Image (tube, coloured by chain):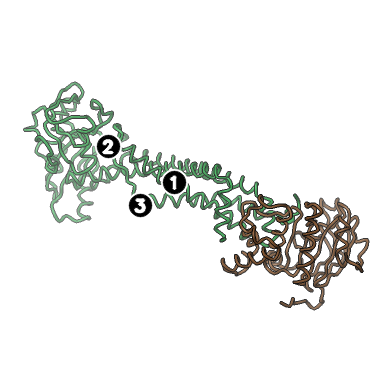
Chain colours: A brown, B green
Amino acid sequence: MPIPNGDSGWVFEACGLKKQYDDGQVQALRGVDFRIQQGEFVAIVGPSGSGKSTLLQMLGALDHPSAGTLRYRGASLQERADLASYRALEIGFIFQAFHLLPTFTALENVQIPMFETHRSVSERKHRAIELLKAVGLETRLHHFPAKLSGGERQRVAIARSLANGASVLLADEPTGNLDSENANLILDLLVGLRREQNFTLILVTHDLGIARQAARIIEMKDGRIVSDALNKEPT
Amino acid sequence: MTFFTFVTRGLTRRPVRTGLTIVGIAIGIAAVVALVGISRGFESSWQTGMKSRGTDIVVSSMGRGLTPKPFSATVVERIAPLPHVAETCTLLVDLISVEKAEMMIVSARQWGGFSWKNLKITSGRLPNDDAERAVVLGKTAAEVLVKKVGDTLQLETEELNVVGIVDGGAVVEDGSFILSLPLLQGITGNQGKINIIDVRVTPGTGKEALTRLCEQITGLVPEARAVVAGEHIRESQAYRMISAMSWGTSLLAVLVGVLGVMNTMLMTIFERTQEICVLLAIGWSRGRIVRMVLWESALLGFLGGVSGVLIGVVGVKLLVTTPAIRGLLEAELNPQLLVMAVAIAVVVGVFSGIYPAWWSSRLAPSQALHG
């Protein structure tokens, strides 16, 4: 399905983006500017406290910037009234700690975001099965998260993030809780799915090895972007 | 998977806590069913008893006690000549401990009065005259006292012969100990006193005429008040007190239920803070989160309500068979009361869920990234 771009042609445009907490005592973002195109694979790297997760929260509309503007497909995200709908339909979120609901099976977890769509019960189930097949978990449909390995849980989370056909995937340290073997498998899966579906992948990591797989690396420090460069040879 | 799956999973993840909360609501609702059912049953038992005696108007002075205050029997002479009055029957009714029964309705009736006529004899006979030292027992009273025709009964200091067992056609009548008026007046030292006059009106007397007659009698008999049969029990301060206590106790029980559900819902929401934030982060609207919490608490209320109705009905059925109460009243457990009890429980559930729902809807989705 072609993804409609706004007038600007950019998926995200950030201009002078700031975020402060505790009445300005903590400056998480100190004026960030960048633009991201549809289909890009961007890695945001930086040490703890550099503001990379805060930036991801802004992109995911999980929090509001204190100053500056953030546009999604040409329209201001701050002025958008239906942020829940934005989170449900436009983006997919992948968390470091997976955050699957423990009392729901893999199949059920993948269906959760689909409640915000008009899909019928059977359509939701059918789509969840397809997505779990796509991440190689067709034999684990009815397993609860406690019965899945870390890598399998993250694969369920990836399937969940794609449930509503998001055009942007935001991943916060998606391999942070995995061993290197599973980390590589998850990264390969994400890269493969991105190639197939052409979604924009924005990945936050402190692991430069993982960041090198992205086509573009944004490095942050103390709430500012210190470098934003194309990676000419993604590994 | 449907939205309802979320609601049920929310409750089944902590089955013991959910079960205990349901039990808590159920006890409250059982109290509502039992107390209100008994209180209403008390009223309807007396109404049925009046109907069974063939009484249209009751003249009595319902004071603070469960039985009316005595007044002079000569009062009846002022009532009998009034238009629309077909017959009168004077009674002295009391609640007295009789042998094994802690409290029994002792109903002494004017000999030959119409209140004797509707009694169906199941064994033995009625007393031969008002001088015979004999009693007839309602069938339930006979069972409670374990007496049959030919046995003797001790009432105060008097020994009386059981000459008959009767079917009175109403719980109150079946639970009564019936004897002639002069006999009880003599035993209790109330010579010349009665506390009830049953009035039967001429056939075809309309509702308005009945009300006018009540007003007329009340004007003629300042020591008592005439009311349409059955309504006199509502005039009793004791009944009003019982009724008020029933509702008061029920209200307390319901309040405890509210606190119980609110506590459970808050606990479950606090435990699931992270999950709720994740749901918000992956696109669930705040409205859907509120609906989820309110449905959970409503379901808790509903389950508690249904269990409470079952416990209440079974409890009341057992209670009215206990010797202390048997024959005095029957509980009125009509479907309206039972549906109302479940509805109260659901309202309690929803009301208790409002604060937890509001609290959970205020959570920030960004918290999903922490932890």
**Numbered-mark total:** 3
Which residue is disc 1 drawn over?
B307
Q: Which of marks 2 and 1 is in front?
A: 1
Q: Which amino acid does label 3 sit on?
A: Pro
Q: Which residue is drawn at 82% across and 76% down?
A: A8
How far apart, in angstroms, are the residues tagged by discs 2 and 1? 27 Å
The residue depicted at 19 percent of the width and 24 percent of the height is B154
Chain of residue at mark 3: B
Amino acid at the residue labelled 1: Ser
- B325 shown above or below B29: above
The disc, 2 or 3, on the residue closer to the chain's N-terminal end is 2
Q: Name the residue under label 2.
A: B328
Between the C-alphas of marks 2 and 3, the distance is 22 Å
The crowd level at tag 1 (other Cα within 10 Å; few <14, some 14-19, many 20+) is: many
Residue B331, percent from left and from top: 32, 43
Q: Look at mark 3 in the image and give the residue it sits on.
A: B335
